Image (cartoon, rainbow, N blue to C red):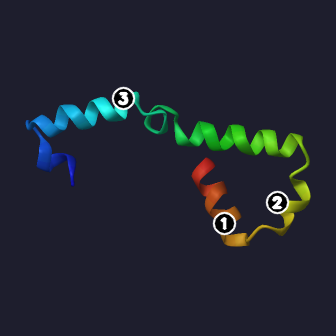
Amino acid sequence: MQWSEIDGMPEQSRRAGLEDSDPAYRVPLKTYVVEVLTRAGEVGMGPYWDKADAGTKSSLEKFLS
């Protein structure tokens, strides 16, 4: 369902309340990914990162830039 479909309907306030209380919506994705990659690097992710799929690494680098 699109937000435009529920504009002004009771479902809009229910959905907004759900998103306001759900941690998945409150944590900025980019910040979270940077934090996780930084922690992973600190504990020795290097060899695994080197073996990661090139397309995946490229996508992450584009997302984080």
- Residue 65 seen in this snapshot: no
Horizontal side, residue 39 vs residue 57: left or right:
right
Mark-to-mark CA distance, 3 and 2: 34 Å
Q: Secondary structure at mark 3?
A: helix
Question: What label does residue 49 carry, if any?
Answer: 2
> Would residue 59 be found to the left or right of residue 50 on screen?
left
Q: Earlier in the sequence, mark 2 or mark 1?
A: 2
- Location of the N terminus (image quadrant): bottom left
**On residue 56, which mark appears?**
1
User: Marks 2 and 1, Cα distance to the nearest angstrom?
Assistant: 10 Å
The correct choice, above or below, for 25 with respect to 1 in the image is: above
Residue 24 at x, y = what percent?
48, 39
Q: Residues within 10 Å of mark 1 (few under 14, many from 20)?
A: few
| Mark 2 residue type | Trp
Residue 13 located left or right of residue 34: left
Pointer 3 and pointer 2: residues touching (CB < 8 Å)?
no
Query: According to the image, label 3 marks what residue?
Result: 20
Q: Earlier in the sequence, mark 3 or mark 1?
A: 3
The structure residue drawn at horizontal position 89% and vertical position 43%, both measured from the top left corner, is 43
Residue at point 64%, 44% (across, down): 33
Give the number of the mark in front: 3 or 2.
3
- Secondary structure of the residue carrying numbered label 2: helix
Of the residues shown, which amino acid type is indicated by label 3?
Asp
Q: Nearer the viewer, mark 3 or mark 1?
A: 3
Horizontal and vertical percent for residue 29?
A: 54, 42
Q: Residue at x 35, y 35 (%)?
A: 19
